[in-house]
Image: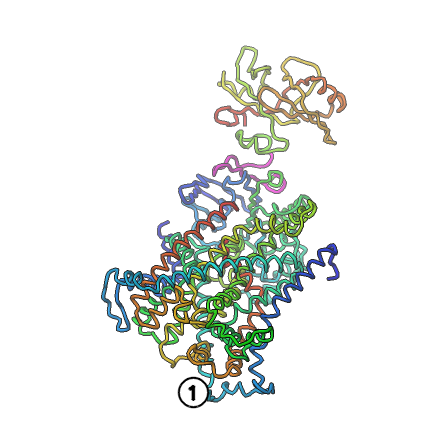
Amino acid sequence: MKNDTRPRFERKKENIAVLVMILLCIPVLFIYFSFFKNAFFVGGTGAFTLDNFRFLYEPIVLGQRTVQPIGQAFTNTVIFTAISTVCEVVISCMAGYALARMEFTGKRVITFSLLSLRLFPGVLLLIGALYVLMYLGVLNTLFGVIIVAIALRLPGSTFIIRNFFTGIPRDIENSALVDGCNRMTAFFQVIIHMVKPGIASISMFAFMSAWSNYLLFNTLIFNTKTPVLATYLRVLSRNDQMIADYGVFAAMALVYMLPVLVFFFISQKQLMEGNISGGKGI
Amino acid sequence: MIRIEALRKEFDKGVVALDSIDLTFEEGSFVALLGPSGCGKTTTLNCIAGLLEPTSGSIYFDEQEVTNLPPKDRNIGMVFQSYALYPHMKVIDNIAFSLKQKGMPKAERHEKARKMAQKLQIEHLLERMPGELSGGQQQRVSMARALVKEPKVLLLDEPMSNLDARLKIEIRDEIRRIQQDLGVTSIIVTHDQEEAMAMADKIAILDNGHIQQFDTPEMLYHHPANLFVAHFMGNPPMNFIDASVSIREDGTWLQGETFAVRAPAAIAEKLAQMDGKAVVIGVRSHQLDVSLAPAPETLELKLSIVENLGKEVMVSGELGESRIRVTMPDGFAGSYEELTTLRRQGGSVYLGLQKEFNVFDKESGVNLIG
Amino acid sequence: MKRNMRQKNMQAYFFLSPFLIFITVLYILPAILTVAMAFTKLDSAFIWEFNGLNNFRKIFKDPNTIIIIKNTLFYVLVTIVFTVVLDLFFAIMTTYFIQDERKGNLFKAILMIPMITPAVVYSVLWIWLLEATDTGLANQFYLALGGTQAVNWIAQYPFTVVILATLLTSIAYGTTVFSSAVKSIPENQFRAARVDGAGEWEIVRNIILPNLRFHITFITLWETLGLLTNYVTIMLITNGGPGVQTEVWALSSYHKAFADSQYGYGAAISVLLILVVMVLMLVIAAVMRRQEKSQG
């Protein structure tokens, strides 16, 4: 703060505010820290151990049950997250571009539906979605959950990216057309680069939501053949079965959350921006 | 050569932006489309570029009809008001972008881009990103980008409206120089008449989607085709005085509320059949004789403002309903101080029409002399 | 001209078709089906048998319904009030009082941690924290502060726990929205107020809050919508229990449909909530339209 030219009383206020915020944040951090400490230290003695991480490569026995290694759940989660994120981003970019920049019959109707669906909580329709999946014969499959997950998130992300497309100056697009592009090449060589922040932001949200999604798997998959990390962890923490071992659970949670945390810290800014442009309806 | 025939453009809800536009631009000429905002000049330009599709009419580049060709097949270069540089590409890639679309290998297109940059004195900027450039620099890059493909036509859409006054003059000379060097047919859209006059060989003045006059700057200035053009061209604007034609034995008179002047022979001839017609006399501020004493066939102007502009003195006042501005002729007897005193005392000066002025039909606005 | 429009339509619908297919098949169609199911006694056998308004009659006859409505109202109202107040507090603290953006953003990032924690982990965190034994973290504190006996917090104060847990996940969103709104207030307004002798409290009340009026309305409505329909946190911590003490409307629809396989009945509960949600959506749309107008 070499160039801080503010009067001293203001800096004093800032320091007090910082202090208050630290005091308020400490409990949250303390709880998280204490919880994840369980992963590395044996309950009674406090000795350091990596024993809790054995689920990474071998079946472990907890009480009366045997827990399979995390491999399959991890693979499924990666597949689910990757496919649904990529599809969501590509589809919403295409639709958002058309809605922002093209003239066609039915534009008003589709735009209106987009604006309404964006506000509509899709989780209320899961009963109907379940029936559709059953009819399509993809109930209880990863594929079924993927398509529902994409559909439920499309209105929101299309809305966000449409606003980014609307913000691109027309001149730039015209310039590309004059310089020898057609709509397609202009889209891929010029337009898409100008909505990179928007793409980053919707990818972030898509990733976060897919990676931590629990509800859809719990609702649309009725067997244990297709575990993902969320349901894998959940099995250990059902309300009716006392959690056998917090150490193992904390270790699993840590593995589960690692990608989220990494993503979060590298892209916090987009997360906040997307938060705002997604909500305010500009 | 570019030929536009009976061009018409309607937008949604039947708004007519352009109607019956006929224009022919000579090879290598520099033409300005001039008019107030919303007059249709940018629409015309976009139709020429292929960014808008005309409702009817046709556009020819030489003998080839291009009306329905997409922009990329017309071989045009375009400079936009906002410059529209691609923000994610280095300057050199911006300039070479159109060559890349043609499939030219990288080394070759960079070489061409470099040469064009040299012409515009922006070689030192080639490795930068557009965001790091000043407005004037971006302008030059966008010129280079438009010209590097050796276009058949160069289109400029208000290219200088985002620049400050000094830079504007510098860039406009630059554009003119390069245009003449390369001999590329160029069309500029502008609302700044001074800019149009300084740059263009010919100017098309548009209003309400119609061409009002298409002529050289001199003709537009001295012989505006109608009242709209007369109002629009020149600074200070032309003075307008209401009168009616009265043909008597001793000549053709222009009769106003407070004056009567005899028309010079050349003008009288044009007005021969128009006895009693309501007209508007249009006369530029420096085309009036001024005297301090009343004389026959003069117009009395009650002074309300006296301005010293440095190189000349300008007075203005009311004459009937209209406001008249007069630049004092070189040999004028009275000084600035004298005129100021005169104004304070509520005095008047007396204006005499010279040989050259315009007379417009009050009803239709058409120039009866031109 | 006509041929041209057709070409434009082809191009646009090429871009739109994946979106439209997904939305039609997995959004619109489920919506229609959900409404239709509400008038059937569809169960795990999935036989469509319409039974008119029976499901709705059943809802109103169920003695638990009134409890669930009370729970829902209490849950939404209390959470929303605290959420908005805390959002404002944190936004003003991290943006107005802490002008150093890096510090402000660090605190906002910490506030975001509960939001980004996957629900499955987040719920266990609370269960672990509030464990009924002496070794539970909350109880350790309680005993250290003079408590005599370990408390089973979740069993004893289920609603408080549920609200606290929800609250912590919901403050991040409002805080970011408010704080960007605070940031967009021109600095000159603060300077002018200070020159006029306003204290910090007056600045907050007379400058910041009026400037945030739209955002506060928006967040209140938006979060209400979210609280009415998101039941994952409650489901994972108390699952509506003990008994129906923390059962809320959306969760009860889930329980009826997916736990008891009474799909028709669950859909009927869902449809009633959808009606409420649609009213809320209309209000949100009206508020946003008014804001757009006032901004020109």
Q: What stretch of residues is rendered in magenta?
A: B197-219
Q: Residue at x 51, y 42 (%)?
A: B41
Q: How many marks?
A: 1
Residue A98 position in % (x across, y down): 43, 58
Q: Chain of mark 1?
A: A
Q: Does A152 appear above or below C292?
A: below
Is residue B216 covered in magenta?
A: yes
Residue C196, by quadrant, is top right
| Residue carrying label 1 | A65
Residue A127 position in % (x across, y down): 34, 67
Q: Does B59 appear above or below C130?
A: above
Residue B238 position in % (x across, y down): 60, 28
Is residue B251 covered in magenta?
A: no
Q: Residue furthest front?
A: C148
Could you tell me if residue A81 is visible in this image? yes
Q: Does B167 appear above or below B250?
A: below
